[in-house]
Amino acid sequence: MVGLSVLETYPTVAGSDLWRGYLEVLESGGRYEGEPFEYEEVLAGMTRRSRFAVRVAACMGGLIVSWVRLDTGEREQRRLTVMQRLAGMGWADWDLFLNETTWSEEVFTIFGRERAMGTVTLEELPRLVVPEDVPGVGESVERLLRGGKPIDHTFRITTPGGEIRHVRIVAEAELDVRGAPVKVRGFFQDRTLVNRAEQQMLEHQQAASAQSSLLAAEKDVAARLQHALLPLPQQSLRVAGLTVDVAYHPLQEGLNVGGDWYSAIELPDGSALLVVGDVAGHGLDAVATMAQLRFTTKGMAITGTSLAEILTRLNTLLLHTSGRNFSTATMIMGRYDPTTSQLTWVQAGHLPPLLLREGCARYLPAPRGILLGAMAAPCYEEATLQLMPGDHLLLYTDGLVEVPGGDIDEGLARLAHTAEAYQGSRILDALATPDARHDDTCILHATL
């Protein structure tokens, strides 16, 4: 403000008593001290009104002016009021000797009381408390008034409007020389919103815990279902004179797997049933369809139903299963008779089996058979193969040979080349862990 005139710095004083006081002191010397007045100014874009007292004295042809702000205490009081309101907190004083109670404005707000209703003494406080909380409040107040022990207690009140609020009181007593309380100072805090938030958090935690327990139970059920419905990842069996090694590798874990499956069991007549199948799709629906085909196939094979008839009935089963989302499945199935070393086999839209004999791999010509669920009246035919000692027979699903965007014939040629390169039990080890698997794979390796 150096170099500025009075009217440039305080333009609103023009024509006021203060302005006339300035002129009088400037002309005659002496001093001027006017009555306190309100002055409005704009600071940081906000209009503020304050009370000032101004003293003016002549000095070296000019004026020395002192502005004294008189409302600092008022500002602090307003600041304190705002802080109490934001914190939901108000102070209270009880003069036990004079029997006087003083509340801040916020305490009246917390208790929902008009000022005309007056304050409440500590002895009267339990009257505002809900019945269930009265004993606790009464004991705390009694310890404070009789023994001077500080209290920090939360209770519920009923406002004149009937609202239930959670209120916290924190208070301590001033004692006389004999140790008797003469004054009590403290504050009340409205904890209704805090308690409500804590209750909601507790409810959310309980809901989360219940959900976690539910998920754990569902995970356990899913694991049990997976164990019951899905094939084992890898196993080696001895069935009707055949050594059967199987590898099952889903692309995804859990029950979000596809419908690849296998079965290798000994039938009541001493023959062996070898099956590999692939249901279209992934997830629980594919697993459910796979389980349906798997168990139905076993059941019919055990009763002596011919292989071609089994496929026909499975096709009918797929076509007439309600709520079914996956309409098709491929399947290859063989029955091995250990007395004749003959394998009778059928297929429904499945890739041909690979025979490795004397180090040379070749695919068996496939008998007639369309995939399951494709048409109402399909025709399935049987083919036979005479197995010889040292033969290796591979039944597999398309995930072993198919590559997205690749030629299926290239995949089949690659499989045959791998089978020739890895003889004996090493075949399964080489095929079961491909470098890049793009789909579920299931491989059944039978040797005589």
Image (cartoon, rainbow, N blue to C red):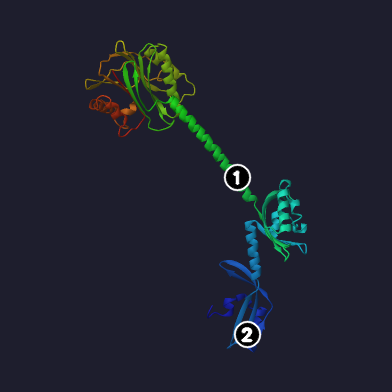
Instruction: Give x and y (percent) for residue 427.
Output: 27, 26
**Residue 91 is at least partly visible in this image:** no
Q: Which mark is residue 21?
A: none
Instruction: Give x and y (percent) for residue 152.
Output: 66, 55
Residue that badge 2 annotates = 57
Q: Nearer the viewer, mark 1 or mark 2?
A: 1
Q: Amino acid at mark 2?
A: Ala
Q: Quadrant of the C terminus?
A: top left
Q: Quadrant of the N terminus?
A: bottom right
Instruction: Name the one closer to the observer, 431 or 439.
Output: 431
- Residue at figure coordinates x 59%, y 69% from the top left: 42
| Residue 256 falls in image quadrant | top left
Report the Cα–Cα distance between label 1 and label 2: 66 Å
Residue furthest front as drawn: 178
Say if mark 1 contacts mark 2, CB within 8 Å: no
- Residue at figure coordinates x 30%, y 17% from the top left: 366
Quick check: 173 above or below 132?
Answer: below
**In the visual, does 117 lie left or right of 86?**
right
Residue that badge 1 annotates = 200
* Disc 2 secondary structure class: strand
Marked residue nearer the N-terminal end (1 or 2): 2
